[in-house]
Image (cartoon, rainbow, N blue to C red):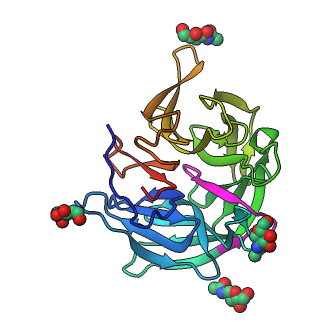
């Protein structure tokens, strides 16, 4: 079952989501330089601004890498080009552990025009990964040193078509592998990774685990969440949430979990990201959409 938690009265396009230890949601939009918050437990949830990032017009991926401390992507987002104005992509830190939010610039990625989803690296709270949808790569960002480098680049992450086509979109490290969607190629894949003192490295070949269904130019995998059983709950444009999971023999399969894969917008209008609720709330998945849901 699905339930509408909130609908933006202006239809503010929502891009990415993180959950605070309190259960409150943090929301980003490519149309707004603010990190927004809402309490999904309140009867009539309202959106509030937590922090406004200077020199930017839009935010993309956001991920918690330590309790109530986040890394996120800010840029000047060019709506015509549907990408960042070159030279404006900045990875910020946002610490919400004290009464007043503290934000700092971790590192600029001037050569990128589209940093999209972000992932923590379980067990390595000094590292986060960020997807470059145009270049087709996963950047590794080291928080303490404020450095960024391409950790993994692969044809399976590249869009295979000119901009603004998006390659790698969402990415999440889980159980020794980096899982990622490729919007243009319509693929959900994983690549084994190893993490050591030098960072995140590829440790095997890309395996394609799923193809977007039904295929078509408007059917695109976006960001996703992985549950404790290793199943992926993937948002799919124009209007569905798909569950991808391995069968007993290791072959992956998928089924529609919610919404309408044909895109009637019956439940979701262009879903963009999904995240599990905090703590014991793992049976609730929160989904953002481009229609401000
Ligand atoms: C929530 O909002 C609706 C519509 O504005 C209103 O009818 C209802 O009374 C509100 N509920 C609460 C608990 O404030
Ligand atoms: C914003 O950009 C201006 C002009 O490039 C620069 O002087 C200023 O330091 C920037 N502010 C921040 C917080 O980065
Ligand atoms: C935004 O993108 C359009 C179309 O590609 C381009 O003509 C324009 O110069 C861009 N604006 C900025 C500020 O880069
Ligand atoms: C795994 O099981 C499924 C369902 O029984 C079957 O369709 C598929 O062919 C099997 N894959 C392999 C590699 O045996």
User: What is the x, y in percent for residue 36?
Assistant: 44, 69
How many discs appear?
0
Could you tell me which quadrant the N terminus lies in? top left
Q: Residue at x 60, y 82 (%)?
A: 54
Q: Residue at x 41, y 40 (%)?
A: 266
Q: Nearer the viewer, residue 246 or 161?
A: 161
Could you tell me which quadrant the C terminus lies in? bottom left
Question: Height in image: 239 above or below 70?
Answer: above
**Would residue 107 be counted in the magenta stretch?**
yes
Question: Height in image: 116 above or below 168?
Answer: below
Q: Residue at x 64, y 28 (%)?
A: 209
Stretch in magenta: 106-123
Q: Is residue 216 visible?
A: yes
User: What is the x, y in percent for residue 198?
Assistant: 74, 54
User: What is the x, y in percent for residue 81?
Assistant: 74, 63
Residue 57, located in which quarter of the rendered image? bottom right
Q: Is residue 102 left or right of residue 195?
A: left
**Would residue 116 be counted in the magenta stretch?**
yes
Q: Nearer the viewer, residue 239 or 55?
A: 239
Q: Quadrant of ligand 4?
A: top right
């Amino acid at each position: 079952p699905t339930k509408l938690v909130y609908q933006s009265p202006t239809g503010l396009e929502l891009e990415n989501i993180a959950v605070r230890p309190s259960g409150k949601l943090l929301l980003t939009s490519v149309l707004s330089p603010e990190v927004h918050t809402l309490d999904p437990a309140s009867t009539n949830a309202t959106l509030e601004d937590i922090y406004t990032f200077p020199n930017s017009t839009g935010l993309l991926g956001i991920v918690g890498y330590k309790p109530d401390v986040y890394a996120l992507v800010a840029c000047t987002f060019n709506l015509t080009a549907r990408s960042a104005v070159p030279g404006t992509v900045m990875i910020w830190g946002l610490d919400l552990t004290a009464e007043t939010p503290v934000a700092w610039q971790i590192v600029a990625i001037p050569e990128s025009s589209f940093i999209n989803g972000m992932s923590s690296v379980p067990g390595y709270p000094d590292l986060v990964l960020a997807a470059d949808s145009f270049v087709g790569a996963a950047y590794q960002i080291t928080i303490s040193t404020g450095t960024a480098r391409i950790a993994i680049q692969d044809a399976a992450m590249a869009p295979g078509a000119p901009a603004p086509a998006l390659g790698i979109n969402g990415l999440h490290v889980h159980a020794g592998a980096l899982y990622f969607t490729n919007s243009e190629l319509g693929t959900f894949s994983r690549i084994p990774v190893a993490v050591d003192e030098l960072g995140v490295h590829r440790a095997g070949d890309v395996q394609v685990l799923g193809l977007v269904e039904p295929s078509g130019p408007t059917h695109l995998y976006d960001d996703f969440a992985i549950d404790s059983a290793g199943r992926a709950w993937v948002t799919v444009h124009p209007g569905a949430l798909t569950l991808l999971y391995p069968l007993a023999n290791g072959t992956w399969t998928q089924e529609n979990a919610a919404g309408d894969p044909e895109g009637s917008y019956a439940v979701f209008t262009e879903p963009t990201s999904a995240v599990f609720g905090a703590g014991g709330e793992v049976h609730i998945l929160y989904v953002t959409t481009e229609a401000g849901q």
